[in-house]
Image (cartoon, helix red, strand yellow):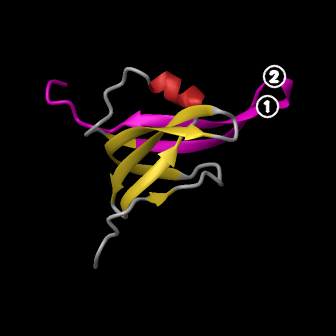
Amino acid sequence: MSKSLLPAYIKWEKEGQEVQGVVQSISELTNGKFESSCKRYTLLTSEGLQTVLLGAVTDEKLEGCDLIGREIKIIYKGRLRLEGGRSMNNFEINDLTEDQNG
């Protein structure tokens, strides 16, 4: 059985949806719709390469975390309502990598 060399894009649609894998790369993605940018995370999962977008707020929370090479599990927790009628995707993100010193 072969695996695609190109990452599959994961669309967050259902609360409780999960993606687990080892982070291969994190790259900047500019979104023309809102004239802002967010990060694109590419993970090597049991199903092959998968790419996810988590949004600018989650990106900011993860800033400074060295995720490359770490196994993480991302759980979609649904939409979170913000002031002014806006909303954002809400995630739980767990680091599953066993630290050699821990």
Give the overall secondary structure of the magenta segment.
strand
Residue 53, image x and y in percent?
A: 53, 43
Reply above or below: 89 against 13: above
Which portion, as a residue range, is magenta?
73-102
Labels 1 & 2 near each other (Cβ < 8 A): yes
Local packing at callout 1 (Cα closer than 10 Å; few below 14, some 14-19, many 20+) is: few
Figure quadrant of the N terminus:
bottom left
Q: Residue 79 in magenta? A: yes
The residue depicted at 33 percent of the width and 43 percent of the height is 23
Total marks placed: 2
Direction from residue 76 to residue 87 in the image, left or right: right
Reply above or below: 73 against 100: below
Residue indicated by mark 1: 86
Amino acid on which disc 2 is placed: Glu
In this view, the residue farthest toward the left is 100
The disc label shown at residue 52, or none: none
The residue depicted at 40 percent of the width and 59 percent of the height is 7
Residue indicated by mark 2: 83
Marks 1 and 2 sit apart, C-alpha to C-alpha, by 6 Å
